[in-house]
């Protein structure tokens, strides 16, 4: 009795599919001779994370790996800080072959410090926070601070914008009325380096500031940019125009900026620190520093609590205005 030809064809096809699936699986070749197959998800903190078909994801030490093979494209960061989009081919003798735009490049295995999935072409994250304090008794005061920001990524182009509105009253009189808008554009010319521009507007009549406009250009570098942490710094130059109650001035301005966020405890808890320093090469050579440092903790869904310390400092303020202003804000926020 002979097996019908169609059945043989189906069996052959199944075997071919199984063999193909095995051949296409990612592989780790270990120093002890073991070969681990599965799906390589990332390389972080000196470990390779792989998910085999027969178990949950686990990590192995990079120092114990001879070679990595993975067909999918990763965003790979090397020891010198440069970043490339590459797949992993074979490796031996302490070297790893990367495939970059169909061209093979050998690098020391120890130089591969990070490999993650490339970010999507479109990505957006936004949040809004409200902080309110009410006091009554010997002193009646009302303090309100609203803050919102948006980060938008379109391929190699990033946009960041934030808005701060602050209103403080004591015994029915305003003691703070600040409106501040910041915008930054980054063009990732050669990751992690970028070029871009910045713009800002500020108003605070309590400090005799009618308007302050700043436009500039900057060059920057991402120190970290992964799922759990982001740190970028930039340096640039621009033009500032200030309008006070009784005078106005304008001229060249030096620009420095830092933004840092670090997530902990499965991304439920976050630390952040942002600051901007502007040095004005006109008038009294004034310099202005604005910092915002704090923590966010997820409550439920997209709702979180926050506590932050804001510090504004100017070296040469108008007469009768203090040099610094400190705000401790505690409130609620939502991400969307």
Image: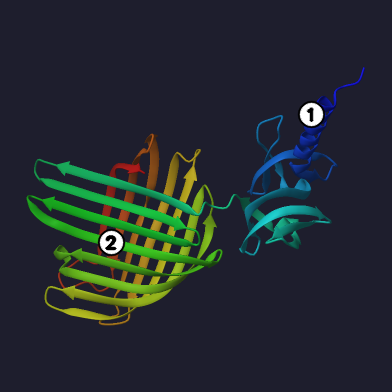
Nearer the observer, disc 1 or disc 2?
1
Mark pair 1, 2: CA separation: 65 Å
On-image quarter of the N terminus: top right
User: What residue lies at 35% left-to-right and 39% top-to-bottom?
Assistant: 304
> In screen coordinates, is 232 left or right of 241?
right
Question: Along the line of sight, which residue is nearer the eye, 247 or 196?
Answer: 196
Q: Position of residue 64 (x, y in %)?
A: 77, 46
Reading the image, the residue beneath label 2 is 181
Element under disc 1: helix
Quarter location, residue 2:
top right
Q: Position of residue 40 (x, y in %)?
A: 68, 43
Give the total number of marks visible in the rendering: 2
In which quadrant will I find the C terminus?
Answer: top left
**Secondary element at image label 2:** strand
Rendered image quadrant of residue 296? top left
Residue with the mark numbered 1:
10
In this rendering, the answer to whether 91 lies above or below 214 is: above
Q: Residues within 10 Å of mark 1 (few under 14, many from 20)?
A: few
Q: Nearer the viewer, residue 267 or 327?
A: 267
Q: Nearer the viewer, residue 161 or 203?
A: 161
Callouts 1 and 2 close, C-beta under 8 Å: no
Q: Give the residue furthest to the right.
A: 1
Depicted 187 relative to depicted 301: above or below: below
| Residue 222: x %, y % from top left | 51, 62
Q: Is residue 23 left or right of residue 203?
A: right
Residue placed farthest to the left in the image? 172
């Amino acid at each position: 009795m002979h097996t019908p030809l169609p059945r043989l064809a189906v069996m052959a096809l199944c075997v071919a599919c199984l063999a193909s699936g095995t051949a296409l699986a990612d592989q780790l070749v270990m120093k002890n001779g073991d070969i681990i197959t599965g799906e390589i998800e990332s390389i972080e903190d000196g470990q390779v994370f792989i998910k085999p078909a027969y178990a949950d994801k686990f990590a192995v030490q990079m120092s114990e790996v001879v070679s990595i093979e993975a067909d999918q494209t990763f965003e790979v960061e090397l020891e010198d800080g440069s970043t490339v989009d590459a797949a992993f081919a074979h490796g031996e003798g302490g070297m790893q072959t990367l495939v970059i735009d169909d061209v093979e490049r050998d690098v020391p295995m120890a130089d591969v410090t990070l490999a993650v999935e490339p970010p999507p072409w479109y990505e957006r994250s936004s949040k809004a926070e409200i902080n309110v304090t009410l006091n009554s008794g010997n002193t009646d005061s009302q303090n309100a601070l609203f803050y919102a920001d948006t980060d938008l990524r379109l391929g190699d182009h990033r946009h960041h914008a934030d808005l701060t509105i602050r209103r403080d009253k004591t015994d029915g009189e305003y003691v703070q009325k600040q409106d501040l808008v910041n915008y930054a554009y980054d063009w990732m010319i050669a990751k992690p380096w970028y070029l871009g521009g910045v713009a800002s507007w500020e108003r605070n009549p309590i400090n005799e500031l009618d308007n302050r406009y700043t436009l500039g250009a900057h060059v920057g570098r991402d120190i970290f940019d992964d799922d759990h942490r982001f740190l970028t710094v930039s340096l640039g130059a621009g033009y500032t125009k200030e309008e006070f109650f009784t005078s106005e001035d304008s001229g060249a301005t030096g620009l420095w900026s830092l933004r840092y966020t670090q997530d902990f405890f499965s991304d439920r808890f976050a630390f952040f620190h942002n600051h901007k320093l502007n040095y004005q090469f006109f008038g009294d050579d004034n310099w202005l520093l604005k910092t915002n440092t704090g923590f966010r903790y997820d409550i439920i869904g997209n709702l979180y609590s926050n506590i932050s310390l804001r510090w504004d400092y100017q070296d040469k303020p108008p007469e009768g205005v203090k040099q610094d202003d400190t705000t401790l804000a505690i409130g609620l926020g939502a991400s969307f």
